Image (spheres, rainbow, N blue to C red):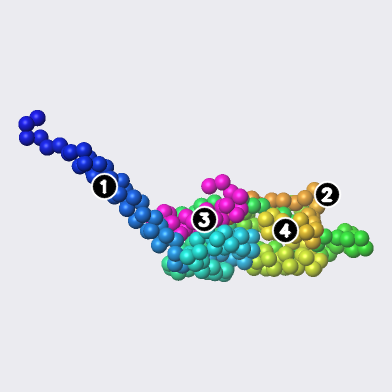
């Protein structure tokens, strides 16, 4: 039409080149921003038994993939890590069966169960009959997905124990079991390596293993941080190391 402007062939080439250039600049800016967000410090809280199950492999994975990302890891009791999360002193906590609180969200990392274990017996070790007076070791505050305690599970299965070692961590319970001082209730993932090494064996009642108390291990963080690249990277690393589908 009369008065309408159009680009020359050289102008069209320049326009196309400019579009591609601006797209590449935008991609570069997003990439650099992503790298910046995956540097610095991410503060995470958990407790000892979960730390042993999850963190050695996760930290190795993260160090290889994101060398600029520093993880500040704290292991404390459950109440302490929740208090520090709510106060903003921690950005993520890894906990079993998390408390449901407004403005926080939890992602399931894996599911586990409790089971009773004893030290692996060898020829010449004490017979089962002589072991009946052994105490039980377990974390009394631990509950399953339905908030049923370990003690209640034992009672419901007719497992009598006059003496218990009430401990604050499953790793301490495991150390007592490995010394042959007691039977003990452990999460199956924590007991797994000791079973493979034949240092622990499964306790059986009437010839059957005693397994109960399904529970979930979750990563919990503030809802507004759901898309935080550092949190997403750490959760993905945890799921990868635990062989969990995202």
Residue 73 pos. (x, y %):
54, 68
Viewer-side residue, 19 vs 106: 19
| Residue ID at (81%, 52%) | 205
Question: Is residue 240 one of those drawn in magenta?
Answer: yes
Tell me: residue 125, above or below residue 147.
below
Q: Is residue 125 visible?
A: yes
Mark with earlier residue (4, 1): 1
Tell me: residue 207, above or below residue 171.
above
Q: Quadrant of residue 87?
A: bottom left
Q: Which residue is mark 2?
A: 206
Pointer 4 with pointer 3, Cβ within 8 A: no
- Which label belongs to residue 53? none
Q: Which residue is mark 4?
A: 193
Judged from this view, the residue extending furthest toward the left is 2
- The crowd level at tag 3 (other Cα within 10 Å; few <14, some 14-19, many 20+) is many
| Residue ID at (38%, 58%) | 32
Secondary structure under the numbered disc 3 in the rendered image: helix
Residue 83 pos. (x, y %):
48, 67
Mark with earlier residue (3, 1): 1
- Which label belongs to residue 18? 1
**Segment tinted magenta in the rendering:** 220-246
Mark with earlier residue (2, 4): 4
Question: Is residue 170 one of those drawn in magenta?
Answer: no
């Amino acid at each position: 039409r009369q008065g309408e402007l159009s680009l020359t062939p050289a102008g069209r080439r320049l326009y196309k080149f400019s579009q591609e250039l601006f797209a590449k600049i935008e991609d570069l800016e997003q990439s650099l921003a992503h790298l910046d967000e995956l540097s610095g410090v991410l503060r995470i809280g958990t407790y000892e038994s979960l730390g042993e199950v999850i963190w050695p492999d996760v930290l190795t994975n993260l160090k290889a993939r994101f060398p600029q990302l520093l993880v500040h890891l704290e292991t404390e009791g459950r109440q302490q890590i929740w208090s520090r999360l709510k106060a903003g002193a921690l950005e993520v906590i890894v906990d079993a069966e998390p408390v449901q609180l407004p403005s926080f969200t939890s992602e399931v990392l894996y599911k586990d169960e409790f089971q009773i274990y004893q030290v692996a017996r060898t020829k010449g070790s004490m017979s089962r009959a002589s072991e009946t007076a052994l105490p039980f070791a377990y974390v009394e505050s631990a509950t399953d997905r339905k908030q049923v305690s370990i003690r209640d599970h034992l009672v419901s299965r007719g497992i009598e124990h006059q003496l218990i070692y009430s401990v604050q961590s499953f790793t301490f319970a495991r150390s007592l079991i490995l010394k042959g001082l007691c039977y003990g209730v452990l999460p199956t993932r924590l007991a797994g390596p000791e079973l493979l090494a034949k240092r622990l064996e499964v306790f059986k009642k009437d010839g059957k293993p005693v397994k109960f108390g399904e529970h979930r291990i979750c990563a919990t963080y503030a809802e507004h941080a759901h898309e935080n690249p550092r949190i997403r990277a750490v959760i993905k690393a945890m799921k990868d190391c635990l062989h969990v589908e995202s």
